[in-house]
Each structure stands twice: as C-alpha cells, then as structure tokens.
Amino acid sequence: MAMLQFFIAVDVTVVNVALPSIGADFGVDGHALTWVVVGYTITGGGLLMLGGRLGDVLGRRRILLLGTALFGTASLLAGLAPSFILLVAARLLQGVGEALALPAAMAVIVLMFPEGPRRSRALSVWAAVASCGLVLGFVVSGIVTELFGWRWIFLVSVPFILVVLAAAVFLVPGERPAESTSSDLPASLLLIAAPLLFTLGVVEAGKADSTLPWLPPVALAGAAVAGALFIRVERRSRNPLVPLRFFRGRPHVLANLATALLSAALSTSFLLFTYYLQDRLGAGPLRAGLTMLPLAVSLIVASALVPGLLGQWGARVCVLAGICSTVLAMAAIALVSHFEATGLALIPAMVFIAAGMGLGTVGLQYVAVTGATEDDAGIASGIQRAADQLGGSTGITICIGVGFAPALDGTDPFLTGSLLAIVGLAAAGLVAWRISVPVAVTGQPLG
C-alpha cells in the first residue's frame, strides 16, 4: 500500500520540473501546460469520494486492483503519448486510477490497524510516504528529465505498479460486496466540473490580452452552479456520494476543511520553489531537482518524530504547530524572493514546509478517520484525500494563477502567492483550533 501511495504521490509533482521539456517537445505554451499538473489532481480529487464509496460497496480489494491497474496503464500511455492532447488524456486517466485505488488502500490500512498507537504509526508511515513522494517527485523529475528525457518520469513507475498488483492479489484479503451497488455518478461529475471551471475562470481572468473576455465570468459562474447542484443532488439522492450522516461528526468536517486549506498552501510552496529556482535563478532540471533534497530529508526526519509528538501533544496541537510552521515557510519564501537570494536561502523554508506537512497532515488524517467503521472507512478516507487534492489544486489556481497572472505584471508573484497562502493558513488555524477528538493515540484526549 505504501509503494502504491508513493508512486501516486510522485505523479502529483513529477511533471513540474519537466514542464519546460514537455512544452518544447509538443510546442505548447505555459498556459496549456498547467493542465498537465492541475488536471490530474482535480480529476483524481473529484472522483476520490466515488472511489471510496465503490470500495465500500463493491469490495475494497476489487476496487484496489482495478484502480491500480488503471493507474499503471495510464502511466504507460503518458510515457508513450505521441501528442499533447493524448498526454493530458493520460493524466486525466491517471487521476481516475488514483481515485479508485487510494481510498481502497487507505481503508485497508484503517481496518487492519485498530485505533490507538498501531493506527497512529501506520498512518504516520502512510503520510510520510506520501509526503516524500510529493517532494521526491521534483528530484526524480529533474534527474530523469536531464538524463533520459521527460517520458521516463511516467514510464519508471510501471514495473513498480506491477509489483503492487501482484502483491495485492496475495496479501489483501477478499470480502463480500455490499448488497447495495448504486453509486452517485452525477454528484461525482459535478464535483469534477466545479474545480475545473473555477480553474479555467481564474487562469483566463489573469490573461492581460484575453480574446475571450466573457469566458472568465461564465466559467466562474458555472463553477458556482456546479457546486450548488452538487449539494442539491446529494440531498435528494437515496444513496448519496457523501452520506449526510458523515457531516454530523464535527471533528471529521473540521479536519477535512483544515486539510483543504493546509494543502492549498503546501502545494503552492512546491511550485514557488520550482519557479524561483528555474525561472528566477535559471537553474536547469537537474540542479533544481537536487536543490529540493533538503526538503525530502527534512520530511523523513519530521515523519519519524510525528508519531511520538502526536501521542504527547494531541492532534489539535500538532495540527496548529504544522500550520504555524507552514506560515513561517511562506514568509521565508517571500523574503528570499524580495532579497533575490540564492537557492540555498530556501532551505529554511523547506524545513518549515517539512514540519508543516509532517505535523499537520498526520494529525488531520488521524482525526479524519477516527471512529470509522468497516461500513464507512472507504468514504471517510476518500473524503480526506479529496479534501487534500482539491484543496491543493484550488490553492495552486488561486495563489499561483493570481500571483503569476500577466495582468498583474509588475508585482512580485512570489510575495503575492505567499500572502494569499498565508490568508488561507490563517483560516486553517481558526478551524483547527475548534477540533476536539475524544479518542486517544496513547489513552489521553487528543483535543
């Protein structure tokens, strides 16, 4: 499960350093290339709750195998794509595979490890692998792109996915499907449409010389309508994608809202690191990737320390500490950009981001799945992952889309992006302050 999580996480960020090479190969500009990044996370995040629901209904082992096979096939297609359109289509298909496989994998972990120290350690490993995968995606992208070409950033994962498939067949126990097999496909489509339209609206609004001035307001209005329709469909559905009883658990709702806000800032920081190293300092793919190594090392250290801190401090304190650390990271990025410092000056920001991811992500994941039963473990994990990915893609859309918009030429994009991320983190802090969990990691209240 951790191996699957690693390569799915890698594919979230592995394209960032390789984007200039992809653009040069297919002759497309930076505006079109953003869809290679955001399209994957939006499609995956939008379908994650459906994937969690299908795992609960049809059997987690079955959906796990289906999603993993689909992800591996899409990775192969992305590496062999003869055109940019087919590359984007393969990335969207990767998102579908992720949406099916990840909730089932996390549900397997939740059900195998009871609440308490064992689940805390298991989720810490899970979060550590995800965090390292996100960061190592930059490193792997730089090395592989420089030495072998961008296509291998997708092809390298294929043999490992085959190992996951073979291992899951023998190691993951089977289960009987539930009696009800209905799913809420309209709600899933609306959940994808809303962030896609929102992204389109924000990106197009940032153009200085847009030939379609009507497109941004129409797209943003469409996003609002899709969001409203999603709520209406869920209320009327006999078998909703997100059962309304889930929202009766106040800690779960707060944890997922805080997850989305924190992920928005963390995802933004990754691109700010990349843009500063490559665009501002002119570093090549290999140098940019290697410069991100301190972040990966810091994440490993932070993830090793978090289980003990979670038991000593409680979930809420860990989450608040992670949010505060991320605020310091965004402030550090803005200062480095203002003084036009070298890439080494970003190391403190990377350390703060590692602490933010380690403390905040693990604490929020624990709260989000606390109290989950065999009947709803899949949907609980699916919602948590959806909040993470949709929050990240929305954060990139707002912080990067607005900060680097041609219409704002003349302003410091790193300062603008950092300030927008800090505003979101302030909201995350207010939400996390209200989190209280009665179940303990070490027998003591987490709230």
Image (tube, grey):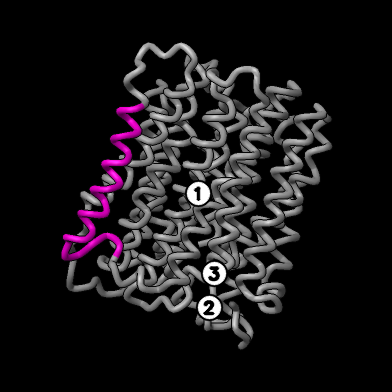
Q: Does the rendering let one see residue 12?
A: yes
Which amino acid type is shown beneath numbered disc 2? Val
Query: Farthest residue toward the bottom?
Result: 443
Residue under the image location 52 percent in, 21 percent down: 30
Which amino acid type is shown beneath numbered disc 3? Arg
Give the labeled residue for mark 1: 8
Residue under the image location 36 percent in, 73 percent down: 248
Give the labeled residue for mark 3: 434
Give the labeled residue for mark 2: 437
Q: Give the percent coordinates (x, y) of residue 439.
A: 53, 83
Image quarter of residue 55:
bottom left
Image position of 241 (left or right of 65): left
Image position of 243 (left or right of 341): left
Q: Is residue 93 above or below residue 25?
A: below
Q: Residues within 10 Å of mark 2 (few under 14, many from 20)?
A: some
Q: Are marks 1 and 2 in contact (CB under 8 Å)?
A: no
SS of the residue under disc 1 = helix
Q: Does the rendering let one see residue 142?
A: no
Give the magenta-colored segment's residue range: 217-242
Image quarter of residue 430:
bottom right
Mark 3 to mark 1: distance in Å? 32 Å
Q: Give the percent coordinates (x, y) of residue 425.
A: 60, 51
Mark 2 to mark 3: distance in Å? 10 Å
Q: Which SS type dominates the magenta stretch?
A: helix
Q: Is residue 220 magenta?
A: yes
Image mark for residue 219: none
Q: Residues within 10 Å of mark 1 (few under 14, many from 20)?
A: many
Which amino acid type is shown beneath numbered disc 1? Ile
